Amino acid sequence: MRNTIRFTAASLFAGAMLAATAGAQTVSIKGSDTLGAKLVPQLAESFKSKNGGVKFEIAAEGSSTAFPALANGTAHIGMSSRKAKPEEITAARAKGIKLNEVEACHDMIVVVVNKANKVKTLTKDQVGKIFTGAVKDWSEVGGAPGPISIYTRNTASGTYKDWQTLAMGGKNYAGSSQKLAGNEQIAEEVAKNKNGIGYVGLAYAKKSGILDVTIDGVEPVAANAKSYAYSRACYYYIPENADATAKAFLDFATGADGQKIAKSLGFVPN
């Protein structure tokens, strides 16, 4: 059974005291690129400034990498842009590790196109058809003629799976789609290709050279998080018996100061 929890102020105090008295301690955090490329590193830097002696190792290689690392003890905290699968929870339990789920923040998966593309708005139906390959040319959705180049996350990504569910009705991606490691790589490729289209987290949607697309008349901005078609929650996972410093970091990340950092980066705070 998964538990959504918020650790207490007492654990924050305990973590701070541990960091201050136990010398250098390294907290390993693995998983989601959406959380791990920008947000968690900034949270870690802020936490370190208040808790001397704590170090962080952050590996943002996709949500699916979080759970094996938690199960085998090579991560203290997992980052995920999707909920853990039952089999991932079970695999950890089989090794004596009960995972608690902590809501990190909310995110919006934003459709982005090249800045030269005159397509500024799409319907959910059009988006689904583009990413499944049913629509292959920009002229079919009101753009200039040209073959659509699709950029997606790789299969280790929670966003890859979420997009299949939220935008594609569970159908397969177009065979021509190009899989990339992270949000920043997708933004870079779309910025270089006038026929490109991809999806990125809201925090990555303002890169130079790309434009975000309005979906069914709703702009992808934080104020529209509840009405935007592709909104979702992101999560941290932590062993129930995690040490005080790891718990203290999650208290900070999900507390007022941490959520302020999340908002500044384009995430939607809880």
Image (cartoon, rainbow, N blue to C red):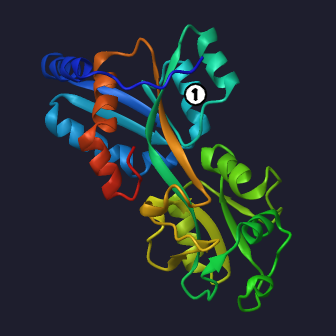
- Residue 177 appearing in the image: yes
- Residue 157 appearing in the image: no
Numbered circles on residues, count: 1
Q: Quadrant of residue 178?
A: bottom right
Tag 1: amino acid:
Phe
Q: Work out which residue is located at the far top of the displayed protein and give it.
A: 96
Which residue is depicted at the point 71% across and 66% down?
124
Instruction: Reply above or below: 53 against 60.
Output: above
Residue 62 place in picture, x, y as percent = 57, 43
Which residue is depicted at the point 70% across and 23% down?
87
Q: Quadrant of the N terminus?
A: top right
Which residue is depicted at the point 61% across and 36% down?
64
Residue 118 place in picture, x, y as percent = 62, 89
Residue on which disc 1 sits: 67
- The foreground one among 192 and 86 is 86
- The foreground one among 5 and 133 is 5
Residue 55 place in picture, x, y as percent = 27, 32
Q: Quadrant of the C terminus?
A: top left
Dot 1 surroundings within 10 Å: few (below 14), some, or many (20 or more)?
many
Q: Quadrant of residue 137?
A: bottom right
Instruction: Reply above or below: 87 against 184.
Output: above
Residue 219 place in picture, x, y as percent = 52, 71
Which residue is depicted at the point 31% across and 45% down?
259
- Tell me if 84 is positioned left or right of 170 in this view: left
Q: Secondary structure at mark 1?
A: helix
Q: Quadrant of residue 156?
A: top right
- Tell me if 229 is positioned left or right of 105 in this view: right
Instruction: Reply above or below: 164 against 57.
Output: below
